[in-house]
Amino acid sequence: MTDIDSFTEDQNRKKIIEDKLRFAGPDYNNCLVNLSNSIIKRFGAETTANTLPIADEYLVKGYRNVVILLLDALGISTLEDHLEKDAFFRSHIRHTYTSVYPATTVAATTSVLSGLYPNEHGWLGWDMYFPKLDKNVTVFWNKEQMSELEGAIPTIGEDGKHAIWGTDTLAESEVVADFDAASTYIPYTNIIDKINAANEETKAYVSSPYVDPCPETLEKILERIKDLCDAPGEKFIYAYWNEPDSTMHDTGTKSADTHEVVTSLEKTLEKFSSELSDTLMFITADHGHIDSNNLCIGDYPEVLNCLVRRPSIEPRTLNLFVKEECKADFPEIFKRNFGDDFLLLTKEEVLEHKLFGPGENRDGLTDMIGDFVALAISNTSVFNTHFQMQIMPGAHAGLTAEEARIPLIVVES
């Protein structure tokens, strides 16, 4: 028996994986995909997964307007850290459910917008390996994954001790193609188009900085929602705002800045909801957030020298393409370097345990996820550059309850 066989056939291993996923992973019958399918069902389009029963209870009430407002990273733990139980957001939580895996914006918002599990739509994380390009691609930017200049060295801070990794240590990220790689290689039909095609009497819209007419502030996003809700006819509106995620990445989950953002969001949304009529609004999140202990893969040459290419997906969910001659020893090498901070799965275990969803795997998925996938089960994240390692005290996309658990806040106007 080879080392890799003894690694995967450990009698206790399957139970360990199942227990980790059950405790801190997604509940694929109680997650964002199910909420999305409740919306799809309400507006007469064809569902692709089970609906979310608690959402269905509100949707059958027949409100003229239905809104999903997704506040990035407003997980249960963030609400509990910054708001009292009787505050507007927490007092209107009607259900606690989960993100998908990885618990990250690319995978989760795509699941909401498609009604599909990540293994069905294929948009797994911020950076993805596309075999047809043989490149790691930052999917929202259509650029090569951020990388460090060979031989880059930091400057030393004024204290004479701390290394400072600036943008001058980064290689230029080139556009990967004259077409959008993600939408070309892993396309999906969004629920806006599904709803608009299913019923001429209803309309679906988006209010997001990234979709025309591209409202750039929360105030403008809400203004667009209000204008659409005031217009005649039944409609669904999907809205997205990038806070408090952006602030938590910069300052951590418990900072004064994060507290100010969360409380400001709450005050703004409480006032806004009072201005709506005949509207059901679901306020939710794509994932939670965690304070992170950051490392850089470049500081672990024993691991790096085993790899065909740099890891992608996310710093807390690493896909690892391993050289053939290193595969048998890789689990031991990885553990020697990162200890018990990650749960290392083979590709076969990822698929067996349906980590990315219970649906049918989309074509090409298995070629994108590597030979192993490392799931962060502590607060450790592994970045590809020292610059990224240095600037992000907050992170997500790992296998912890803080990242998985999200609220369904319901406001009836």
Image (cartoon, grey):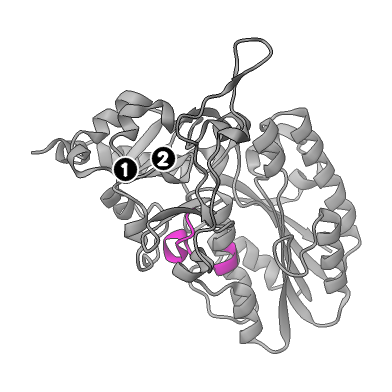
- Residue 22 appears at what percent x and percent y? 42, 44
Q: Nearer the viewer, residue 300 or 50?
A: 300
* Label annotation for residue 142: none
Q: Measured along the vertical axis of the image, is residue 197 above or below residue 409?
A: below
Query: Circle 1: is it few (<14), some (14-19), or many (20+) Cα within 10 Å?
Result: many
Looking at the rendering, which quadrant does residue 360 occupy?
A: bottom left
Q: Which mark is first along the chain, 1 or 2?
A: 1
For residue 85: magenta?
Answer: no
Figure check: 185 above or below 309: below
Q: Residue at x 66, y 87 (%)?
A: 199
Secondary structure, mark 2, is strand
Report x, y in % for residue 70: 69, 56
Residue contact at pointers 2 and 1, CB within 8 angstroms? yes
Q: Residue at x 74, y 70 (%)?
A: 212
Q: Position of residue 398 (x, y in %)?
A: 49, 40
The span picked out in magenta is 112-125
Quadrant in which the C terminus is drawn: bottom right
Residue 196 in sight in this render:
yes
Q: Residue furthest top?
A: 160
Residue 347 drawn at (x, y percent)? 29, 50
| 149 sits left or right of 363 in the view | right
Mark carried by residue 345: 1
Residue furthest to the left:
1
Q: Quadrant of residue 45?
A: bottom right
Q: For mark 2, what is the residue?
A: 375
Residue placed at 46% from the left, 59% from the top? 118
**Of residues 323 and 198, which is closer to you in this image?**
323
